[in-house]
Structures are given as C-alpha cells and as structure tokens.
Amino acid sequence: MLVLGCGKNPDAAQFTPGSPEAIGLDIYTRMACDACHSVNAKLNRGPTLNGQFGKEIRHTDGSVVIINDQYIRESIIAPRKFIAEGFPPIMPSYKPVLNEQDIENLIAYIKALK
C-alpha cells in the first residue's frame, strides 16, 4: 500500500512495475508533488491531478486551456506561465531537476489518474 501526503492513491496498484505510469508515480512521490497536488480530487495548495487530463483549466489572467501533454510539460518547466485560478503562484520550475524522460513519465502518470 502506498500512502501519499494527501491520502492513499487508489490507482497505484494498477500500474505495471517499470511502466511509464509507475515511474511517473515514483517521480511524483520523490519530488513531493503531493505536498501541493492531490491525486484524490481533494483541494490542496495546487490543482488536483485526479481526472484532469483533457479538461479545461482557467487561469488568473482569464485564459482557459485544455490540460494536455504540452500544458503539463509547460507547467512543470515554466509553472508561472499560467497560474491556475484560485491558487497561489508557488510552484518552482523543475526544468533543472527533471529530464525529458522524467517529464514524459509524469505525464503518463497524470493521464492515468481517473
């Protein structure tokens, strides 16, 4: 059983060890993403990741975009480009920490959250 800061992740058991989703979950855990982003639809300091892929998100500047691979990538490397409405601009850039494969694995994990 995997326990995260925001609660048990019900999807953890479905990931095949070594799969992009499982590796993404490991990165999510090691990078302490759960300190701000829940995976169980509960509000936190940042938007939940649960079931958000493909949905619209509104930003403090009034813009609305679809959460897709490119949006997640930009949010990880340039998090202040778009600030989600209702949340403070506190996320740091992970560009110096994560490589492209790490980001791809995180995206696979986020896409798998339902």
Image: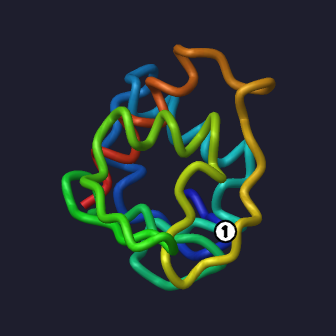
Q: In the image, what residue type sits under mark 1?
A: Cys
Q: Between residue 8 and residue 48, name the one nearer to us.
A: 48
Q: What percent of the width, then of the height, locates residue 2?
A: 57, 57
Q: Is residue 54 depicted above or below 5 in this figure?
A: above
Would residue 56 appear left or right of 84 to someone viewing this image? left
Residue 56's spot in the image, x, y percent? 24, 64
Q: Residue at x 21, y 62 (%)?
A: 55
Q: Image quadrant for the C terminus?
A: bottom left
Q: Which residue is pictured at 66% across the width and 48% down the height?
A: 29
Q: Can you tell which quarter of the image residue 94 is in?
A: top right
The residue at the point 45 percent across, 20 percent down is 18
> Which of the 4 image quadrants contains residue 49?
bottom left
Q: Residues within 10 Å of mark 1 (few under 14, many from 20)?
A: some
Q: Secondary structure at mark 1?
A: loop
> At which x and y percent is residue 31?
74, 44
101 to the left or right of 91: left
* Residue at (71, 27) in percent of width and height: 95
Q: What colour scheme has been applied to the protein in the rendered image?
A: rainbow
Q: Nearer the viewer, residue 91 or 3?
A: 91
Q: Is residue 1 above or below residue 102?
A: below
> Residue tagged by mark 1?
36
Judged from this view, the residue extending furthest toward the front is 61
Residue 79 in picture, x, y percent from top left: 63, 49
Most foreground residue, 68 or 85:
85
Left or right of 7: which side holds 22? left
| Number of numbered callouts drawn | 1
